[in-house]
Structure formats: C-alpha cells, structure tokens
Image: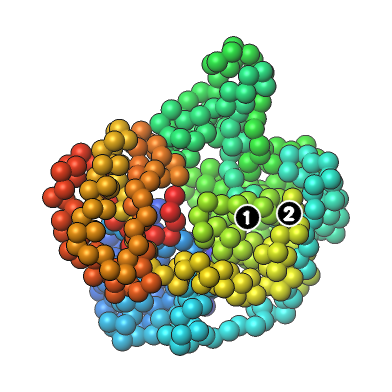
Amino acid sequence: LTPQLVGRFKRRFNVPMAVMHSGLNNRERLNAWLLARNGEASIIIGTRSAVFTPMSQPGIIIVDEEHDSSFKQQSGLRYSARDLAIVRARKLDIPIVLGSATPSLESLLNVEQLRYQQLPLPQRAGSAKPPKISLLDVRSQNMEEQLSAPLTQLIQRHLDNGNQVLLFLNRRGFSPSIICHECGWVGHCRRCDTHMTLHLQKRHLRCHHCGSQRPIPQQCPDCGSVDLRPLGSGTERIETVLTEQFPDIPISRIDRDSTRKKGSLNAILNDINSGEPRILIGTQMLAKGHHFPDVTLVGILDGDQGLFGVDFRAGERMAQLIIQVTGRAGRGDKPGQVIIQTHHPDNPMLQLLCQQGYHAFAKAAQSERQLTALPPYSHMALLRAEANHSLPPENFLHQAYNLAEQLGAQGVELYGPMPAVMERRAGKYRYQLLLQAQKRTDLHRLLGPWTVQLNKLPEARKVRWSLDVDPVDLI
C-alpha cells in the first residue's frame, strides 16, 4: 500500500477516507475501523486484512493487483483476501473489480468459462506509449556485480539526457551469503536449511526466513582462513557499485531494509519525484503501484531468477513481475526502454513474454498447466506438519494418509508424505502431504470428515499441523 496510491485517491475524491495496513498502531487501527463501521469513511483503502472491515453501506469492492500472492495469508488463519472479497461481494450483492495488468491464470480461466466479465484496457493512461523491451545476452559479457557493459553505457546515456533509471533485483542485502575462498565454507543458518544473507551496512549475517542474525565472522569457522568473500549480489551491493561508477548521481534504494522506519518510504519517493537525474535500485517493492514519470530506462538485472523455480507457479510469477517492473518505464511523455539481462535469451517462454506480451505468455502457460493437470485445471490442499524432530511429522502424515484412504478418497490423489523443500525452518522439521483433485467437490467431500479426525490421530499431539486449501506455493 503506497503513499502515492492513497494520495491519488485523496486528490480525486473529496470524501472522508480510512486507511488500513499493518503499519498502524492499535489506536490508529481502531479509529480507522470505527470510521468504516459508522459510515464516516466513504472509501476504505487497505491491505489484506482490510477485507474484514465492516462497512455501513458497501457499494463496490476493488481488488488491485489481484494476481499478487501476498493476498494469501500464509500463517495462522489461512485465507485468500481476493477470494474472500469475491465471496463478500456476492453475499452483499455488489459489484467487484479484480484489477491487474497480469491477471492470474485462475482469473483468466474464469473469464474463459464466463464466470467473470473481462473489461480490457488496451492503452496506457494518458499519452504514454509501451516501452521497448530487449533481451540482453550476458553469457559473453564482462560483468561488474550483475551490471554488464552495455547496460552501464545505457544508464549513462539516459542520465546524460536528464532522465531517471530504475534497476530491479529481487534480492535484498549485500549478497546472498559469504564463502570461504580456501575451503568453500558458506554461512548457513543454524536454524534453517538455507544460507544467511550478508548485510554489510548492519555488519551482520541475517536469515531472511527465521530472522536470526549473527556478526560477520572474522575468519572461517572451519579452516581459520580470513579470506571470506561475498557470494553473489543483492540490492545493497548494487548500490555500492553504482555509487562508485556514478559518484555525482543520487541513488535511491527501495527494499524492506531501506524502508523499515516510519516515513522513510515517503521521504525516498519525495526525493525521486524531484525530477532530477537519479538511479533507483530495488526489489519488488519498486514494481507495485509507483508512478515515476521521469524513469525512461528499466534494467532487470537477473531475468533468469524465476526460470528454474521448484514451484510450478514460478514461471507465472516471473512473467508477472517482469511486466510489472517494465510498466515503470515511459509512464510520462518520454519513451521508455527496458533491458532484461539473461543467460538464457533463447528460452521460449521468456521470448514469448518479451515479443508478444503477457497474454500470449499466459495462453502458453495455461496449455502447459492443462496438459499436466495443475491448477487452475485441478484443485489442491496441502497438509503441513512440523516438530522439533523429523520423525513425528512424518509419522503424523503417514497416519493422515491412511485415514484419507479409509474415508474413501474417490477422485483425490495423495502425494507424500515428503519433506518440505526447506525441510528445517526456524528450528522445526517440516513435512507435507499434498491432495489433488480434478473436481473441487471431490476434494471438499474428503476434507470435511478428514480434518475433523486429524486431531484424534496418535501423533497429532506431537506436531503442529495446518491445512492450506488452494496453496499459493508448495515450498
């Protein structure tokens, strides 16, 4: 939820408004809730939990960026704010608008099946033209921390013309980890099956999964060598390199680390909107809801990030993110240019996305999903279990599997139990059991009696378990 978005609504509609998001304290949240409930606020703008806000006279619900996976609450009470908004609109008998330049494959299928009415917007707002998108093969390029020579030259050219440049890398921190150049030791998290990210400005290693952190070691814990080097690049490292290459150009970094303090994002956006030549570097926070009229060049530093993800939705998310980022270029009167650095310029899906756009990509992705019977052409539920040791969750899920078989899982396939992709997270061992059905009715016919009896299983008290219907990821 960006300050720019709230500001646009305030300028356009001269009515009382309430804003709901996680940055509010309890008093601010209560005040916004009361304004909405009592009808004193005509417009409620909010993040995921705003779907529960009471309204005295609801007239329409708008879900912006409906494709965004952050609409799914992943812990505690699991729900999809988008899907809840659809249910709420139906019960209230009011219209609902799902807005997106890159609709989810689920929504596109609903359009095909005439459940949704599609209202296309074929042109950009105002007189802005779509940016020119080019793939840059970096396999033979000399790279300076993810920056190729051709991209660096383009950055200089656009800055010389008095414009702004946006560089996108969806990895925060200085580097994904550190490595010992002598023995190959890598800074792993002690509580998770993953590495710790190097944050050089804070002088520590931090796990982005469990939040644990520790000081940067002065020498290798395994061999004692002091030759410890950053492994890979994050936004913090790119910012450092850009500062050296363009010492006279202001650089604004937008990621979760640089915007933690209240008001910090507003301050950065005000600097950007001054209109002076500037380089913007950031993560997916830069891709959502921002209007930068002076940005004429967008550089996607790692276009391959989503090509080989373990989740079947990785390609769809990659395409959505690329299109969202490219949409930041050429939004004003000046033409925009987009450069995507890649080691796989011949990848058919990447070429399709760049040459024919998102909807051509989505058509191809839908065909693949239909061929492999994956959502939206099937329906899933994921039973997760975790404990301090690996045996209890595995045993619990075996018992859950047998229970499902006893109940008669007609039309439902069960896969597992299996360890999660990251088996150990925050000190807990995690296992999962996947249920998949072609018909949602078959899946729910099993889930009803099954979930009631899960807590009665012998191993249930030894684990913490959760059931996620329509999971947005399987990791």
Q: Nearer the viewer, residue 90 or 7?
A: 90
Whole-percent x and y of residue 392? 25, 38
Residue at position x 70%, y 46% in the image: 251
Residue at position x 16%, y 59% in the image: 452
Vertical relation: 167 (above or below) 86: above
Whole-percent x and y of residue 475? 44, 50
Could you classify mark 2 by the number of other residues whose Cα lies within 10 Å: few (under 14), some (14-19), or many (20 or more)? some
Residue positioned most to the top: 224
Q: Are marks 1 and 2 in contact (CB under 8 Å)?
A: yes
Whole-percent x and y of residue 428? 34, 36
The answer to whether one can see residue 164 in this image is no
Residue under label 1, please give it.
Answer: 307
Vertical relation: 279 (above or below) 215: below
Query: What secondary structure is marked by label 1?
Result: loop
Which amino acid type is shown beneath numbered disc 2? His
Residue under label 2, please give it.
Answer: 344
- In 3D space, how far apart are the residues under numbered discs 1 and 2 (Cα atoms)? 9 Å
The first of marks 1 and 2 along the sequence is 1
Which amino acid type is shown beneath numbered disc 1? Leu
Residue at position x 76%, y 65% in the image: 133
Q: Nearer the viewer, residue 459 or 54?
A: 459
